[in-house]
Amino acid sequence: MAIRQIRIIGDEILSKECKPVREMNGRTRELIADMFDTMYDGNGCGLAAPQVGIRKQIVVMDIDDGNRYVMINPTVLKQSGTQTGPEGCLSVPGKNGEVTRANYVKVKALNENMEEYTLEGEGLLARCILHECDHLEGKLYVEKVEGELYDVEPEEE
Amino acid sequence: MTKQSSAREIALDVLLEVQEEGRPSHVVLKQALDKYRYLEKQDRAFVTRLAEGTLEYELQLDEILNRYSKIKVSKMKPLIRALLRMSVYQLLYMERVPDPAVCNEAVGLARKRRFEGLSGFVNGVLRTISRKKEDIAFSEPWLAYSIPEWMLSMWEHTYGKETAKQIAASFLEGRPLTVRCNESLAPVSHIRGELEAQGIAARSHPFGEGLLELSGYDAPDGIGEFANGHVAIQDPASALVGRIASPTAGSFVLDVCAAPGGKALHAADLLAGTGMVEARDLTEYKVSLIEENRARCGFLNLRTALWDAVKFDPELLERADIVLADLPCSGLGIIGKKPDIKRRIQETDLAELAALQRQILKTVWQYVRPGGLLLYSTCTISRQENEDNAAWIAETLPFEKRALGPLLPECIRGKAKENCLQLLPGREPCDGFFIAAFTRKRI
């Protein structure tokens, strides 16, 4: 288990487009395992490779629906509906903000074994997929926030 | 992306702060609800009910856990302890949550909080309790009412077994929010009309027409008549202090430990724009609470000050017509509202608090002008802090007892003993509260 350092907003890598993964190898497998550890450690439900400093199109997600998703080189195929709600990001610590996104999304991606699959998500899963895919294009949710970011860190009396 | 905490996880964090770090439950809960603004109304209600219920029943829940778990509650990891307590509360007292959901959610939370290795233990204990819950019974009344044994036996000793049970049982029952109308700002009939127009039912309390029990509101902040200062949140017992004080126009009233300001606001309202009320408290935070309430009601005859009541202030020597001394106390009368008092207050604290109260009284009596009124009050039910201190005032300080009977609402007139009144929740329709009245001798 290795927890990697999470890059924080302001770090250049978070605003860069990521490169597609060409082949699976030991290093990439290790990266994926570390990304899960890092995500769980930070109480996240999704993490993209640039957030740990790697410019590759890799995303891990676990929204407590019993699945551990890995998306490599994802492409959004379809979006519909809207949802507005709070969102936060491990690269923007202690903050949340309201974001409107599609309520349904269909993506195509590769799994850990570089096999293509499609994933459909609604509600939270759709939100998480879109949030993470944005990372791969160098976008953060803060650009999409309606109103102000607000603190979610515990306050002292 | 980060996870949004579920209602259960928020309740769990509230419990951890209250039970493991000893912070006051009402403060922690309010902070949590402020922080997680995205929660739906029903989730907010769920968090509140789960956190408060678990605290109310903590002693009983621990007993059950100790019966069915091979690891004793005291040996558990803090997170697992809080998680199991709140899960058993749901199994026993939240009938609308199905038992399997309670178990699954608990297991999920254990995993999420990185106690993967204990998730089997959590599951096992909860499923056993779920299966055996019909057999769970308590022979000891203190366990049945989930109240510290010493507290119940202290009340049994003073008031008898039946009344002690009534008190303990009252803490487990929900009670309506009571507000006091600021009648100097609007007539009660107008306030009632406005409340009803907002869909809030208001019923007059037996202690007075201007005291209204509300139902059908979401959050107090959302009540229009609260936002505009026409009503203030105050328990009917505490409102008796103002009624007894009945300041005449132009009086100077000093409240030495005023936060959040209920009695000071009441006094300012009774003065109807005349005189002055000075509301003091120990910390800036507490003073800010009074300020907030003052601003809402817009009273110009109320001012606040930061002052430690233990310290003598020569400026005020014999200045006040009325001194309100509602002093820091064990709070045993308001356990229904602040259930963590059950866990915070130890029997030995009562003597310490009684001593602190005397120390403050030794200072603040000097602010009462000759012929003026001293009202000593607490929101507790303990002889040491209440009757004993009242007797001490009469014996040691230059004051005469002032009979309370004629000043009280008819329904509780018979409860006064000379200048003292002890209200008991469950017996009277209000918080547990004590008031003693004294007039300063004219040398």
Image (spheres, rainbow, N blue to C red):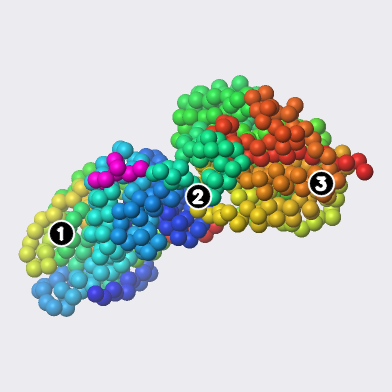
The amino acid pointed to by label 2 is Pro
Count neighbours of disc 3 (C-alpha within 10 A) and say few if under 14, some if 14 to 19, many if 20 or more. few
Q: Nearer the viewer, residue B63 or B370?
A: B63
**Residue extending furthest toward the right:** B443
Marks 1 and 3: CB-CB under 8 Å? no
Residue B426 within the segment the image draws in magenta:
no
Residue at 43% over, 54% down: B14
| Real-space Cα separation, disc 1 to disc 3, in angstroms | 85 Å
Residue at 30% over, 42% down: B135
| Real-space Cα separation, disc 1 to disc 2, in angstroms | 61 Å
SS category of the residue bearing label 1: strand
Instruction: Please state the horizontal and vertical placement of residue B280, each as a whole percent of the image.
Output: 71, 50
Q: Residue B133 falls in which quadrant of the image? A: top left
Q: Nearer the viewer, residue A50 or B408?
A: B408
In the rendered structure, the answer to whether residue B89 lies left or right of residue B270 reads left
In the picture, the quarter occupied by the C terminus of chain A is: bottom right
User: According to the image, label 1 marks what residue?
Assistant: A75
The amino acid pointed to by label 1 is Thr
**Residue extending furthest toward the left:** A115
Instruction: Please state the horizontal and vertical placement of residue A117, each as a whole percent of the image.
Output: 9, 58
User: According to the image, label 3 marks what residue?
Assistant: B395
| Real-space Cα separation, disc 3 to disc 2, in angstroms | 33 Å
User: According to the image, label 2 marks what residue?
Assistant: B148
The amino acid pointed to by label 3 is Glu
Regarding residue B64, the answer to whether it shows in the image is yes
Residue B131 within the segment the image draws in magenta:
yes
Region rendered in magenta: B130-137
